[in-house]
Amino acid sequence: MKVSTRTHYGLSAMSYLASRHGQGPASVREIAQAQGLPSKYLEQLLARLKAAELITSARGAGGGYALSRAPEQIQLWEVYEVLEGELSPVECLHDPAVCRNRKECPTRGMWRQMTEAMKQVLQQSTLAEFATEGPCSCLRRPDVD
């Protein structure tokens, strides 16, 4: 299973906000520059995270985005679910209409087990664990605005 750019960028932005929790809001530009993310795309992700009440925003000079709760209280699962939706390596786990052989499928149990294990890891991990890690080097792009 691959994590989409949406989730990778979103988690990167959230970890930056976690690293400066309690220091006031950070602008989109600040987050984008610190994490090496494209600011236009980041704005879309932050809007989703705000709608899910994982972050808050303040307008005007000195405005920007901040976590709505302490980093220890925000599970990676919450961020993943907002940005990705359903966690499922195969479509048939959450959409019964996809598989004609659902009841007899020899791999269904394994896929379900794998999905639960991944979800459990994300539920047991919080943003606080990533707050001091710094930017992810695989996200760094020289052409980021």
Image: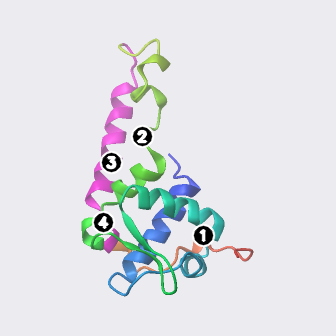
The residue identified by callout 3 is: 119
Q: Quick one: label 1, few (<14), some, or many (20+) residues within 10 Å?
A: some
Give the quarter of the figure containing the C terminus.
bottom right
The CA distance from mark 2 to mark 3 is 10 Å
Say if residue 131 shows up in the picture: no
Question: Residue 25 appears at what percent x and percent y?
Answer: 43, 81
Residue at 39% of width from left, 81% of height from top? 19
Classed neighbour count for the residue bearing mark 2: other residues with Cα under 10 Å, few (<14), some (14–19), many (≥20): few
Residue type at the position of mark 2: Glu
Q: Which residues are magenta?
A: 104-128
The amino acid pointed to by label 1 is Leu
State the residue at coordinates (31%, 46%).
117
Q: Earlier in the sequence, mark 2 or mark 3?
A: 2
Name the residue beneath numbered marker 4.
126
Q: Is residue 72 toward the left or the right of residue 56 in the image?
A: left
- Pointer 1 residue: 139
